[in-house]
Amino acid sequence: MKGVFPYNCKTMKNIRQPQTYIPAVFALITLVAYGLLLPFTGFYWDDWPFVWSARFLGAGDFIPSFAPYRPFLGPIFYFTTSLVPPEPLYWQIFALVIRFLLGVSAWWMFRQIWQDRPRLALTAALFMLVFPGYSQHWVAFTHINQELIPFIFYLLSFGFTFKALRTGNSAHTIIALLLQLCGIFPTEYFFGMEGLRFLFLFFFFQGDLIQRLTKTLKIWLPYLLIWILNAAWLIYYYKFGEYASYTITAAQSLTAFSFLQIALDAVWKAGFYIWIQILPLTFAALSAPTSLLTLGLAAVSFVFLALFLKRVAPAPESASAPAVALIVSGILGILLGRLPSLAAGLPLTLQSSYDRFMISMMIGGSLFLLGLIELFFKQNRIKTYVVALLIALGIGQQFFNANIFRRDWENQRNIYWQMTWRMPALEPNTILLTHQMPIDYETDASFTAPINWTYAPDYTRANLPYLMLYTEKRIGGSTLPALEPNIPITFNYRTVSFYGNTSQMVVIYMPKGGCLRVLDPSQGDAETYSRLPAVLTHAIPLSNPSRILADSPTAATPMFFSEPAHDWCYYFTKAELAQQRGDYEKVVTLGNEAVSLGYQPADPNEWLVFIKAYALTGDLQTAESISTAVLAEDARVRRGVCVAWRQVQERISAENKSQIESRLLKFDCAP
């Protein structure tokens, strides 16, 4: 039986080799897809703990810090962080280089497998270069080390396997085995991908079924042994070792029906939907600048790619492309790539941090799509246009993703500057507690690193000075067992630890679209914000704003972020700080300046600090006018307005209390 991916030495001499300028095109596509917004992106998610560790603990700290998680990742982090400084621009540039190398490595790998089909090899590599299901490129510090570098090792290992077959050089086999070790042991992401090597070998050989299977097993045996060794290691480390991350949970509740659903979902998403998902994403807000720019970039890319592909591969391949083999390999590749995340019980959701699991399905998804194209489009010209369109949509998708991370970086800048405007310095061993920050890619552990960087810029190895916790995730757990005074809090952060207690907390809150604020029990905030989640409002009595050093001679400055324009949130946070000092004249000055510049709050509750200040400085008329306007805008603010006026009543002289009583009646504030 003739092999599906046949190799014939005689015909190989007549195959036109791909032009030498193809790597330059890979570089251009990489730049357009991932680099246009590069100066406006930064660090995200797990980047922050890693980059903080690199900056303050040194590259050598990654070896012990990864021992309880993925011990073979430590050397990769050590190597890259020894080369690249902990600056966001450098890591985003490095991410472009790594992405380019990934695409070129995939191209080289496919050329070793399909030397008589250069067009097919090029197309598959271009699909992998822009693979739109993987949106996490800009979480560069984390994913370069955790996934992309091991993935490149694995691609090169596949390529050297087939180079060894063609040359008969055992050194190439040794290189392939070493690269397999470097690809499979650092992370469990690629555990299932080894099955693809078996499929590639099986479809490569010629002969009947038994002959091909025998040849495949003979070549695959040393790789299989390494795969078994890795499986034994994972079983030991998960079950008996120090592993302190995900646990294997899926097998405990998986049924045949649920597995079928998961399998179909993975094939649908990784093999097809990701290539067109940019259309519903942009059409949902077609007039938005991001949508127009994305579709425009995709259109320009399509024209360029169509011309390029017609020039580089204008003629049909020497043999018909194996559509069925590609589809079968693609489906199995997708399912094998889904196994690690499925074993951990994790979902495969697009446009979220969970789509990082798509990287192990990247080869399978690209093969599946190739197979569909080869099956349904027979004319080479039509095939070229379809391929160009899909790659162009992939470029558009990645530009769309880049803009999401650009906005996230801008949101981070606003958060950290509002934090330092409101809290210029903090007592050591302070916990910042909130329910959740209005941002997509950062958790409380993510925030902990830049908060320490901001408030302890001269930190040397010692106990961690500051910690952020989310009540959404931590309450009732081992970290934050209850919202009661003087409960000890211990939190391990890489190789250092935070020690504090629940009486050393500052409770903060930042609504989506609003400004950061410190919740203060002495200001009646437990009543004002009683509609917030109970796990946050129950913490307000524990909030201790005295841990904020309001009169510190040196104010903290966020790292990496230039100071934004002084909009409403600048005046609000500075007004809250002045209120903490008891300087209500300063609050009034800030309010007058903000209004004179035309600034208005998005959250009506942000008027409360000014209502109180105007009233306490004797300007009851302005305080009343603001209160009336705020209640007309949103009656739900009545509770906060009433709290503000009652606090004014408590603080003014006895002869003026009757004036406050009339306002309380006017605003329907029950005693």
Image (tube, rainbow, N blue to C red):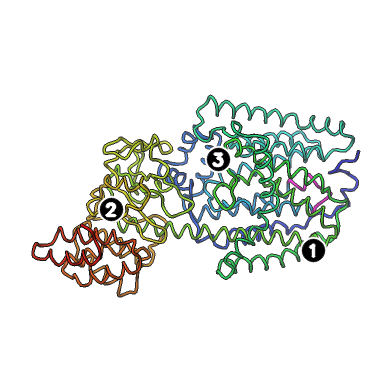
The span shown in magenta is 109-119
To which residue does mark 3 refer?
76
Q: Disc 1 versus disc 3: distance between alpha carbons?
A: 40 Å
Residue type at tag 2? Glu
Residue type at tag 1? Lys
Residue at the (35%, 65%) spot, across then down: 634
Q: Nearer the viewer, residue 57 or 144?
A: 144
Q: Disc 2 versus disc 1: distance between alpha carbons?
A: 68 Å
Answer whether residue 127 is magenta in the image.
no
Question: Vertically, is 426 above or below 388?
Answer: above
Q: Nearer the viewer, residue 523 or 498?
A: 523
Q: Quadrant of residue 247?
A: top right
Disc assigned to residue 527: 2
Q: Nearer the viewer, residue 389 or 307?
A: 389
Residue type at tag 3? Ile
Q: Is residue 661 left or right of residue 640?
A: left
Disc assigned to residue 310: 1
Disc assigned to residue 400: none
